Amino acid sequence: MLLLGAHLSIAGGPHNALIAAHELECNCVQLFVKNQRQWQMAPMSKQNIDLWNSTRQKFQNQILYIVAHSGYLINLAGNCQDVLTRSLQALREELDRCRQMKIDRLVLHPGSHRGQGAARGIELVTTGLNAVFEQIPDVKILLETTAGGGHCLGGTIEQIAQLIDASKYPDRLGCCLDTCHLHAAGYPLWPQEHLDDLLQKIDRHIGFDRIGCIHLNDAKGETGSHLDRHEHIGLGRIPTDAFKYILLHKKLQKVPKIIETPKIPGSQWDNDRKNLAKLMPTSKVFQATWLNAEKIIPRSTGGPHDLRRPLRTPPRTCNPRHRAKSSPRTAFFALA
Ligand SMILES: [Zn+2]
Ligand SMILES: [Zn+2]
């Protein structure tokens, strides 16, 4: 099965994101668990909890994965004590909200070290994550790859791996790949050899089983531009074949794939519907270009890029100490 969904609005209550996902025929969805541009978070009303639970139950056979995305103000790596304190509080509350809503994964941007240096930034993020994991159980955090550049952490695969390895709780940490950010950070996603190289690098440093979500966004900027500007599928710099390859990749089959492409204020579904149609194999738009997708999947067996064979997994080089402590890698994401 191909897992595809969109980031959808929670205006009027989080259950509305599920209703929208149902309307758009998505089998996975991403949402904020609160207003993403405010620090404070009002408790969820009894009515909204009931609506969330009943709507979720109603669509349980269709919507298989739900991913939460944390608020944009959170920065665990910064140099301002007030922001650090608020960030920790906000992250704790969001994790707790995820527990309440029975969402098992929360996407987090690693943050900006604000000139203190990457090493200090990583130290701060690690300390912060250890603290919240100690207080709130269960929910996993997915560190999102970022466009890098400036003081932004998470622009390289190695840095995401470093953050996971430095944690006292590596079993609670996974990653979220964002195609726009990877491309902007300097990883070319096409032709196929580049994408294969990147996927192998990710497997070597982080592990496929730690990928808890993939954001499929086209990019406005050039490779390596560090420009975090999402574009509609097919209208940016990333060839659509790259998205199809990721969608159909055998090793990524159980990873929810979410579009975060631009919305039109007031009628966000129109754009989402169009972007999803470019990626959904059942849609006419996809089928019109399906031959293309067939072409990029080698029919022969034995080739290094044959999707029906598992990818070669080179020996891990990345801090095996923590790996040994982890639960079996295949069980990292057990939902659905
Ligand atoms: Zn994000
Ligand atoms: Zn993203």
Image (cartoon, rainbow, N blue to C red):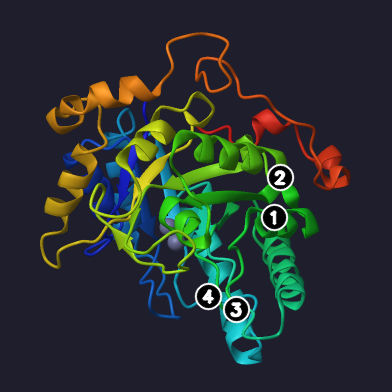
- Please rate how many residues cluster around mark 1, counting C-alpha atoms within 10 Å: few if below 14, some from 14 to 19, many from 20: some
Is residue 312 rendered to the left or right of residue 37?
Answer: right
- Rounded to the nearest angstrom, the CA distance separating label 4 from label 1 is 22 Å
Mark 3 CB lies closer than 8 A to ligand 1: no
Q: Are marks 3 and 1 in contact (CB under 8 Å)?
A: no
Q: Can residue 168 be seen in this view?
A: no
Q: Earlier in the sequence, mark 3 or mark 2?
A: 3
- Residue identifier under label 4: 74
Which quarter of the rendered picture does the N terminus lie within?
top left
SS label for mark 2: helix
Locate residue 127: give its quadrant: bottom right
Q: Do the residues labelled 1 and 2 touch (CB within 8 Å)?
A: yes
Q: Residue 331, which numbered label?
A: none
| Residue 92 picture location, percent across and down | 59, 68
Going 39% across and 71% down the picture, which residue do you hit? 36
The numbered dot on residue 151 is: 3
Residue drawn at (55%, 35%), measured in percent from left and top?
A: 196
- Tell which circle, 1 or 2, labels the residue nearer the N-terminal end: 1
Mark before the other along the chain sequence, 4 or 1: 4
| Amino acid type, label 1 | Glu
Image marks 3 and 4: residues in contact by CB distance under 8 Å: no
Q: Does dot 3 land on a helix, a strand or a loop?
A: loop
Distance between the Cα atoms at labels 3 and 1?
16 Å
Instruction: Tell me if the residue at label 4 has its CB under 8 Å from ligand 1.
Output: no
Residue 134 x %, y %: 73, 61
Which numbered disc, 3 or 1, marks the residue that appears first in the sequence? 3
> Label 4 amino acid?
Ile
Distance of label 1 from label 2 (alpha carbons) = 7 Å
Residue 191 pos. (x, y %)? 44, 38
Residue identifier under label 1: 158
